[in-house]
Image (cartoon, rainbow, N blue to C red):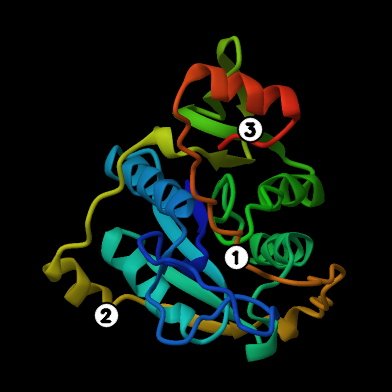
């Protein structure tokens, strides 16, 4: 069984993101980039399925600028068998979920996987929509926020954490599953595997070749950092606090 895993290149979670002075977006100059953490969990699960003999091949795919090859090389070092980059123009750095889902659906038509794993959301825009849209376009079964995944024959069983506890969902393959961070703990890519990854196949295709319009439908009006927290107020007594509350003044 072939497993396709979508991975996105995002700003590393350890980096403090800064907005541009003109509010046009996030400053990405000289910023460390990495695999989206949720996608990293999805990739780890796919590799574990292969190690368990359930999956025969793991294919990592990313949609983005040429630099996303670095992200895919990391995915190969983690255990993916091969990788595919659907390259876009520099000005199309952050494609919206619907366009991503359409491109992935076209690639699924070529690759014919039985299972597609994606992170439940990307940490840069928190859209949480690509997996659901992809399943809808393909007409496949889907499960979201998977904190546990089991495959048996022609079906999959996922466990999802909900307010009242845990919910199990059984779905028939082929399927799209979006995963939560609780699913597993991703492995580190060893130096040996990083060297081996350089010899693994990484195909670069143009997203434009699929004939899909990736023009944005949403407009970001402004990007800005949240206001700093105001200094607290020190009061001498409880009576002073009560008096402030009665007068309607803000107490921080």
Mark 2 in CB contact with mark 3 (< 8 angstroms): no
Q: Earlier in the sequence, mark 1 or mark 2?
A: 2
Label 1, label 2: how far apart the Cα atoms are: 42 Å
Label 2, label 3: how far apart the Cα atoms are: 34 Å
Under circle 3, the secondary element is: strand
Image location (x, y in percent) of residue 168 = 57, 16
Mark 1 in CB contact with mark 2 (< 8 angstroms): no
Q: Is residue 24 left or right of residue 251?
A: right
Q: Which residue is mark 2?
A: 199
Q: Is residue 207 left or right of residue 58?
A: right
Q: Answer above or below: position of 203 versus 172.
A: below
Residue at position x 60%, y 9% from top? 164
Question: Residue 124 sits in which quadrant?
Answer: bottom right
Q: Earlier in the sequence, mark 2 or mark 3?
A: 3
Q: Residues within 10 Å of mark 3 (few under 14, many from 20)?
A: many
Q: Which residue is mark 1?
A: 225
Disc 1 vs disc 2: which is toward the camera? 1
Q: Is residue 37 left or right of residue 164?
A: left
Q: Which mark is residue 143?
A: 3
Label 3, label 1: how far apart the Cα atoms are: 34 Å
Image location (x, y in percent) of residue 119 = 53, 48
């Amino acid at each position: 069984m072939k497993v396709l895993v979508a991975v996105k290149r995002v700003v590393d979670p350890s980096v403090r993101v800064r907005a541009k002075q003109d509010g046009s977006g996030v400053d990405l100059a000289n910023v460390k980039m990495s695999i989206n953490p949720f996608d990293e969990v999805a990739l780890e699960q796919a590799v574990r399925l292969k190690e368990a003999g359930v999956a025969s091949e793991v294919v990592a795919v990313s949609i983005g600028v040429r630099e996303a090859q670095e992200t895919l090389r990391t995915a190969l070092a983690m255990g993916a068998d091969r990788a595919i980059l659907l390259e876009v123009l520099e000005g199309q750095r952050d494609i919206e979920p619907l366009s991503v889902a359409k491109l992935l659906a076209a690639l699924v038509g070529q690759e014919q996987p039985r299972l597609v794993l994606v992170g439940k959301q990307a940490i840069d825009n928190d859209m949480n929509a690509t997996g659901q849209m992809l399943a809808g376009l393909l007409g496949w079964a889907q499960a979201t926020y998977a904190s546990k995944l089991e495959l048996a024959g022609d079906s999959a069983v996922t466990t999802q954490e909900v307010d009242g506890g845990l919910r199990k969902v059984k779905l028939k393959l082929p399927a799209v599953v979006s995963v939560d961070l609780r699913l597993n703990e991703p492995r580190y890519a060893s130096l040996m595997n990083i060297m081996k990854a350089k010899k693994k196949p990484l195909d670069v295709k143009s997203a434009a070749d699929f004939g899909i319009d990736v023009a944005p439908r949403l407009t970001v009006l402004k990007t800005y950092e949240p206001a700093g927290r105001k200094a607290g107020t020190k009061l001498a007594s409880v009576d002073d606090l009560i008096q402030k509350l009665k007068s309607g003044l803000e107490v921080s």
